[in-house]
Each structure stands twice: as C-alpha cells, then as structure tokens.
Image (tube, rainbow, N blue to C red):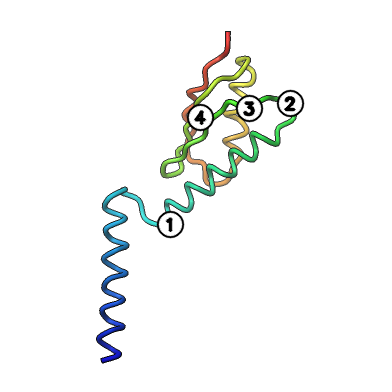
C-alpha cells in the first residue's frame, strides 16, 4: 500500500514537472537560472553610481538578456550593455535601449 502511494506521488510529480516544461519550453532549472541572471543584472545596473538606469527593464530568456527602456545618452546605453555582460551566465545581450531626446 505504501509503495503504491509513493509510486503515485512520484508519478504525479514527474508528470507535473513535465507539463510545466512543455508549456514554457524551459526546465525548472532554466527558469531559476534566468531569474537569477535578471536579478543580478538589475542589481548591477542599480548599483552603478555613474549612470541612471532607473528606467531600464531587464528580461532573460535562456541566458539571453533583453534590455529595454530609456537612457539619457549613447554612453549610458553602451555602459548598461557592458555591465550586463559582466554578469555570470549571460550568453548574449539584446540592447533595445532608447536614447532620450
């Protein structure tokens, strides 16, 4: 009886995990890694005293970081990308930041 319950629980857990993976296309580990990268990039941008990155949004998908929002100058756009590349786990950066006129 106990084996049956444990087996049913394990099967339910495996099927639940598989369903989550098929819905998003990412495993639980990838989701956690992307969340960690996003948080690390946001922290690095926020901590930078030389620039104002308050209007920068960060999104990560399988190690590819997308930066969007508005920055005051081309130098800050470049700096945001450079800081993002310094974060462990970043595979590529799509810098979609717009320069405020």
Q: Quadrant of the N terminus?
A: bottom left
Task: Name the residue that disc number 4 marks.
Answer: 67
Q: In the image, what residue occupies the spot 47% across and 47% down?
A: 34
Distance between the alpha carbons at the discs numbered 3 and 4: 11 Å
- Give the residue drawn at x 31%, y 83%: 6
Q: CA distance from mark 2 to mark 4?
A: 18 Å
For residue 53, the mark is: 3
Numbered tag placed on residue 29 in the rendering: 1
Label 1, secondary structure: give it. Answer: helix
- For marks 1 and 3, give the CA distance: 28 Å
- The answer to the question of whether label 1 and label 3 lie on touching residues, with beta carbons closer than 8 A, is no
| Neighbourhood count class around disc 4 (C-alpha, 10 Å): few under 14, some 14–19, many 20 upward | many
> Under tag 3, what secondary structure?
loop
In the foreground, 8 or 61: 8
Residue neighbourhood size for the residue with mark 2, other residues' Cα within 10 Å, grouped as few (<14), some (14–19), many (≥20): few
Q: CA distance from mark 2 to mark 1?
A: 34 Å
Query: Compared with residue 22, is residue 63 higher up or lower down, i.e. above or below?
Result: above
Q: What residue sits right under mark 2 in the picture?
A: 50
């Amino acid at each position: 009886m106990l084996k049956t319950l444990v087996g049913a629980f394990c099967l339910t857990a495996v099927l639940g995990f598989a369903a989550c993976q098929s819905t998003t296309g990412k495993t639980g580990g990838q989701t956690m890694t992307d969340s960690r990268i996003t948080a690390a990039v946001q922290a690095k941008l926020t901590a930078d005293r030389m620039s104002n990155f308050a209007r920068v949004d960060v999104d990560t998908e399988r190690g590819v970081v997308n930066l969007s929002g508005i920055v005051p100058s081309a130098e800050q756009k470049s700096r945001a990308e450079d800081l993002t590349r310094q974060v462990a786990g970043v595979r590529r950066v799509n810098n979609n930041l717009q320069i405020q006129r």
